[in-house]
Structures are given as structure tokens and as C-alpha cells.
Image: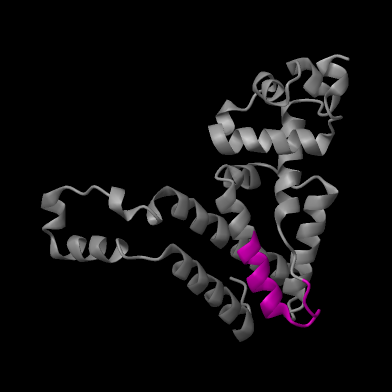
């Protein structure tokens, strides 16, 4: 019996999981059909049995990421808990997968999994009492906040010890005080404060520009 016949059957989802593992460990730029095939133990051309192209592969990875977002099971009218917990779950997915921000911002949701997550999220903002347009604007703002926060968190907010500022700049009272303040920032606490700001704005009545 050959290794080919004993290898577990693959699927589109399994290929996406393997691709996401490559992206997590080596970066999005390192993902290729050849690299993915090696990770799966198959020829690069065999990957095309499960995805039609590199573009389709990235769509499959994005679907996998949407699937990791846990949609809280709360009462329909408990929009505050739903939004807090939903945005927190989205945050956690982005932190687990550093390339996820780029994938979410560069690719539209095309899969049923992704679209159902977005429909659920839009419904929770509609539950606040907003019309369709206002709910869409509020959801966009909240999602943009989460992605922006995570991009900063992964970039430098959580690594203050690596911040190197020229001594002559630190000698400036305003700059020195600001740098000292940022070096004690708690990324989790800042995220929670941002979520509360979103909820407070919704509770007070969302206003479009």
C-alpha cells in the first residue's frame, strides 16, 4: 500500500486550514501552491483539485477565518452583550492570525460562512433600533476600530520595551511624557475601553455624519 493511498482524504476546508497554518508561521507572502503542497505532502498541482487558483485559495482561507468568529448565543434584544462579545471574538481571531487583518481588508466575503457572519452582525446593530443604513455605518465603524486596534496591537502597542527613541527627543517634556505614558499602556484595557465607547455611542443614539 503506497503513501498516496494511505494519506487521509483532503477537502477544501482542510486545504484552507493547512494554508492558514503556513500563513501563521511563515507569513502571507510565503504562501504558494508549492509551499502548501509540501505542507500537505502532495504535489503542488494536486492542490488544484480543491481550489481553482491562488485567489480561490485565499477566499477559502478567509472563509476559515470567518468560521472561527464565535457568534454569541444571546437574546435577540440583548444587543449590547451580542456586540461586545461578537467584536471580542473578532478581535481574538485577528490576534491569533496576524495576517488576518490584511485578508479581511483586501478581500470581500463571498462564502456562505462569511456572509452569514455579516448578516448576523448587521442584525445585531439593527436590534439597537437603527435603520439599515445607520446599522451598516455603525457596523463599519466598529469593525474598523477592531482591525485598527489589532494592527496597532500586533505592531507596537504590546511591545513597548522595543520602542527606541532618540535621547534628545525624550528630553522634550511633552514627548518624554507621552512616550512614558505609552510604555505602560495595556492593549487589552484599551480595547475594552474602545468597545465601551462603541456601545455608549449606540446607546446614546447613533448619529450619521
Could you say where residue 38 lies in the image, as x and y percent from the top left?
A: 68, 20
- Residue at the far bottom in the pictured view: 204
Q: Residue at x 77, y 78 (%)?
A: 127
Residue 101 at what x, y percent from top left? 58, 47
Which quadrant of the figure contains the C terminus? bottom right
Residue stretch in magenta: 73-89
Judge whether residue 86 is colored magenta.
yes
| Looking at the image, residue 46 lies above or below residue 78 | above
Q: Is residue 157 above or below residue 18?
A: below
Could you say which is closer to the camera, residue 163 or residue 206? 163
User: Is 156 on the left or on the right of 70, as rendered?
Assistant: left
Please say if 9 is above or below 38.
below
Q: Is residue 139 magenta?
A: no
The image position of residue 189, as x and y in percent, is 45, 70
Q: Quadrant of the N terminus?
A: top right
Residue 29, position as x, y percentages in the image = 56, 29
Quadrant of the rendered image containing residue 181? bottom left
Between 110 and 183, which is closer to the camera in this rendering? 183
How many callouts does the rendering have? 0
Amino acid at each position: 500500500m503506497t503513501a498516496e493511498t494511505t494519506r487521509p482524504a483532503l477537502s477544501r476546508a482542510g486545504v484552507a486550514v493547512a494554508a492558514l497554518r503556513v500563513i501563521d508561521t511563515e507569513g502571507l507572502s510565503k504562501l504558494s501552491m508549492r509551499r502548501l503542497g509540501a505542507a500537505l505532502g502532495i504535489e503542488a498541482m494536486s492542490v488544484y483539485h480543491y481550489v481553482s487558483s491562488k485567489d480561490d485559495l485565499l477566499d477559502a482561507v478567509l472563509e476559515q477565518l470567518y468560521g472561527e468568529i464565535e457568534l454569541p448565543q444571546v437574546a435577540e434584544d440583548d444587543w449590547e452583550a451580542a456586540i461586545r462579545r461578537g467584536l471580542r471574538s473578532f478581535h481574538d481571531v485577528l490576534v491569533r492570525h496576524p495576517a488576518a487583518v490584511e485578508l479581511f481588508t483586501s478581500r470581500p466575503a463571498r462564502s456562505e460562512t462569511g456572509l452569514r457572519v455579516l448578516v448576523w452582525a448587521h442584525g445585531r446593530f439593527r436590534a439597537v433600533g437603527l435603520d439599515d443604513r445607520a446599522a451598516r455605518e455603525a457596523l463599519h465603524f466598529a469593525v474598523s476600530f477592531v482591525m485598527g486596534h489589532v494592527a496597532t496591537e500586533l505592531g507596537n502597542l504590546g511591545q513597548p520595551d522595543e520602542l527606541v527613541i532618540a535621547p534628545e527627543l525624550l528630553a522634550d517634556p511633552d514627548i518624554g511624557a507621552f512616550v512614558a505614558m505609552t510604555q505602560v499602556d495595556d492593549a487589552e484595557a484599551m480595547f475594552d475601553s474602545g468597545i465601551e465607547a462603541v456601545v455608549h455611542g449606540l446607546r446614546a443614539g447613533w448619529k450619521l455624519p
